[in-house]
Amino acid sequence: MRIVLVGPPGAGKGTQAAFLAQNLAIPHISTGDLFRANISQGTELGLKAKSYMDAGNLVPDEVTIGMAKDRMAQADAANGFLLDGFPRNVSQAEALDDALKLDGQELDAVLDLEVPEDEVVKRIAGRRICRNDSSHVFHVAYKQPQTEGVCDICGGELYQRGDDTEETVRRRLEVYHSETEPIIDHYRAQGLVVTISALGSVSEVTERAMAALRKDD
Ligand code: AP5
Ligand code: ZN
């Protein structure tokens, strides 16, 4: 399956993607995680992305689209993928449509996670991620690690993301409404959008998502 996950910052896209990707046996491709890995490795791409991310703005398309396409071209994504954080504006959605068409492929669904803004703010304020791998995600109240400050998965140190400050979160939400939400209409016109509530426990949301994807099949 080829799925796009969409939803505001802090909706739980990364958290759900980990379970959905495992259930569906497809790779989880997160452009945010790819950027953060580049930043921690000090690559040129990471250097370019960092100032945009710190300000809560989108990294320019000329950097992002190439990176996403390169990742999708890897062997493990040949039979499907779960995209998390890409596409994030209409021009990225059009670039993805074109790239898939060239390969004779198409998306199966766009899973839209709905969460009220006050819940998103709580989820982001308490989020802690792992220094070794930003896909290892915890929460000080909702998903506590066994040992405070230590990743359950790899033993790495947990820290708060630099773009999880109140001011940057406000900017990321603005960018979500103005630039990312329009992709939902873009995909609605293609009959691909499945909307679910992302409130409730992590496993409840996963079950809801799997049921919605099965129904859509
Ligand atoms: P990115 O990393 O994609 O961030 P985001 O979209 O803002 O999403 P988040 O990672 O903040 O949240 P999430 O929905 O994954 O939630 P999570 O599962 O962690 O992008 C960061 C930046 O990179 C962008 O601002 C931009 O600069 C750049 N970028 C990335 N892609 C780009 C693109 N395509 N184009 C241009 N720029 C791009 O959950 C949040 C917290 O809630 C966690 O602590 C979790 O434990 C907890 N939680 C999850 N589910 C539940 C639940 N059901 N109940 C209680 N708590 C929960
Ligand atoms: Zn870890």
Image (cartoon, rainbow, N blue to C red):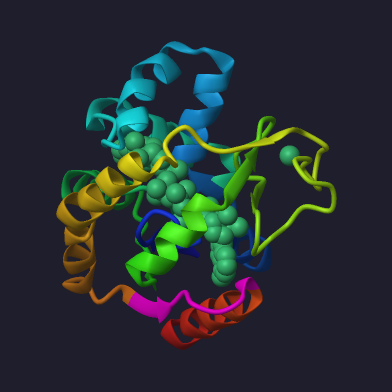
Examine the rendered structure and indicate whether residue 60 appears above or below residue 31.
above
Q: Does the magenta stretch include residue 199?
A: yes
Residue drawn at point x = 47 percent, y = 83 percent = 212
Q: Is residue 26 visible?
A: no
Q: How many marks?
A: 0
Considering only vertical position in the picture, is 141 above or below 172? Answer: below
- The quarter in which the C terminus is drawn is bottom left
The image quadrant that residue 149 belongs to is top right
Q: In screen coordinates, is 23 left or right of 12?
A: right
Q: Where is residue 81 in the image (x, y as percent from the top left)?
A: 51, 54
Q: Position of residue 147 (x, y in %)?
A: 84, 47
**Looking at the picture, how far across and down is residue 89, in whole percent?**
21, 48
* Residue plotted at (44% across, 19% down): 46
Stretch in magenta: 194-202
Q: Is residue 181 above or below residue 43?
A: below
Q: Can residue 206 be seen in this view?
A: yes
Residue furthest bottom as drawn = 215
**Residue 26, image quadrant:** bottom right
| Frontmost residue, 135 versus 101 | 135
Q: Quadrant of residue 121?
A: bottom left
Left/right of residue 70 with respect to residue 16 in the rendered view: left
At 31% across and 41% down in the image, what residue appears?
Answer: 167
Residue 170 within the segment the image draws in magenta = no
Q: Is residue 118 left or right of residue 137?
A: left
- Expressed as whole percent of the image width and height from the top left, the position of residue 152 reads 81, 48
- Which of the two residues, 75 or 37, is positioned nearer the viewer here? 37
Tell me the residue at 33%/50% (across/down): 100
